Amino acid sequence: MDAEALERALRRMAHEIIERNGGTADLVLVGLQTGGVFLAERLALLLADIDGGDVPCGSLDVAMHRDDIGLRPVLVQAPTTISGDLTGRTVVLVDDVLYTGRTVRAALDAVCDFGRPRAVQLAVMVDRGHRELPIRADYVGKNLPTRRDEMVDVSDRGVVLGITA
Amino acid sequence: MSGRIAEPAGDGRRHLLSIGDLGGEGIREILRLADSFAEVNTRAIPKVPALRGRTVASLFFEDSTRTRLSFETAAKRLSADTATFSAGSSSLSKGESLRDTAQTVTAMGVDCVVVRHRSAGVAVQLSRWLDAAVINAGDGRHEHPTQALLDCYTIRQRLGDIAGRHVAIVGDIAHSRVARSLVAALQLLDGGVTLVAPATLLPPAVDGWGVGVSSRIDDVLPRADVVYLLRLQRERQERALLPSLREFHERFGLSAERARSLADHAIVMHPGPMNRGVEIGSEVPEMACTTISEQVANGVSVRMAVLFWLLGAQPGIASTPDVEAAPAAEQAPAAEVAGG
């Protein structure tokens, strides 16, 4: 998946978000640190472009909410920037890759500390399978069947599938 | 103490016993961590589950209000359980030894002990005895590392980088563990220090500290970026070290007039509790240059960072890896570089 295909997928997801929510009113995009942040920013631009309204966009670091804290290194330098109360808003969590679902579970926990959203939806660029929790995405860029020993890298240059050392 | 705190002690546990243990890099890492906890403290619900299931016990053999409350608040905002022990209401008054008291506490399955004691070295001793992380919350005249960390955090917040800044520490240096820790931290961060005190309130070995010393506050104030006032510890003045409190205030106290003469960017700090009209003029705490309540607020964020640093990661796992550069494959069987 190259940069162009990534852009097309994002544009389609933006249209789906608008279709599903009947516009962009009350929408808040929240990119998950670190891989989801640039995607959320791109989606916010596309939504504004398509629908005309300004969509707030924040970032969320879920390190403190993970269930495997202590089992893996924790990256805490990535800032959380969510402005204002999320109560009554529709929050779209944005991440690069949906895998076990544990990051999203942590994000659901964390988001609730900022208020009570009316609804929370999930947008991911790649769904690579291997879920360990009952979590699914509302908007998917690409379904990519993978093995557990493979590694998916999403950047603004596109999506790359590799094998871990 | 030598060695960095990042290297677990012999028993695989980390401790925070003195500023020297941390080194400059360790201090910077804790200050960076504190930034993310400061953000947590601004949330509608300022609480994260990072230390759920861990227990932090406070062992305060000496009176304290703010340090104990600050540690307890920090632990609770990380979802840790807390247990408190204070000397007045304990078996200590029934003649139990320090070691027995401490072992009783850890037999209850405590992960971290925050200890304050009137004798220097108690925290180090406990770290040898106990199977728990030990945080020194003040030992005699020796050290009070978390106070120095929150002071550095406050200076950094107001003035940016500490390197090249000049800090005047004024008052009762001899009895102050705060001064010892702060001088060590500022030197590790390349800040300059001048101690201002009457000769009777300087520690005997001050020549070896590598700092400037002066007995004339008005000579030092014009070039100070930070004026750090220490509480005159009246309860520790066992000998007559001062002619009178009034004379001390006139010669070494920061009056409103002196505060107004400082550089525009300069800040006035005090670790509290303060004696208004002794080391600090009665109206100075309300002036815009003072950071006293910021220091208290920052204390919670910094202590959250310290607790998380000691307890949040298992021994051997650094808390600031570059996950992008080094895939998580070594730690977890499944590669989660691209998120879960």
Image (spheres, coloured by chain):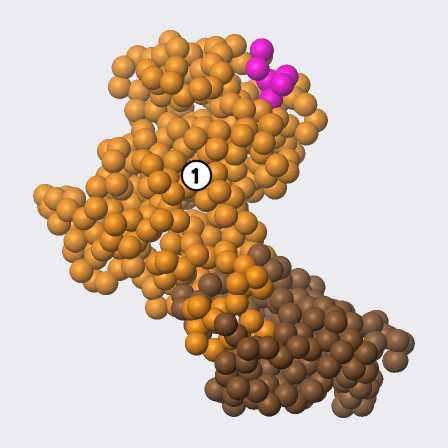
Chain colours: A brown, B orange
In front here: B51 or B2?
Answer: B2
The answer to whether residue B122 is above or below residue A5 is above
Q: Is A97 on the left or on the right of B131, as rendered?
A: right
Q: Residues within 10 Å of mark 1 (few under 14, many from 20)?
A: some
SS category of the residue bearing label 1 = helix
**What x and y, as percent, mark residue B221?**
59, 17
Q: Is residue B85 visible?
A: no
At 18% across and 60% down in the image, what residue appears?
Answer: B107
Magenta span includes A70: no
Residue extending farthest left: B95
Q: Quadrant of residue B265?
A: top right
Residue B168's x, y, as percent?
A: 53, 22
| Span of residues in magenta | B219-224
Q: To which quarter of the image does residue B291 belong?
A: top right
User: In this figure, which residue is indicated by the disc labeled 1?
Assistant: B23
- Residue A160, position in %: x, y? 66, 77
In the foreground, A116 or A90 = A90
* Left or right: A99 as drawn, with respect to B148: right
B244 relative to B78, above or below: above
Q: Given the image, what chain letter belongs to the residue carrying mark 1?
A: B
Work out whether residue B319 can be spotted: yes
Position of residue A137 measured from the top left corner of the image (x, y, whole percent):
63, 87
Q: Residue at x 16, y 53 (%)?
A: B103
B281, A90: nearer the viewer: A90
Residue drawn where x is 50% and y is 72% of the image: A165
Q: Judge from the rendering whether residue B52 lies leftward or rightward of residue B258; answer left or right.
A: left
Dominant secondary-structure state across the stretch colored magenta: helix
* Placement of B261 over or under B93, stated as above or below: above
Q: Amino acid at mark 1?
A: Gly
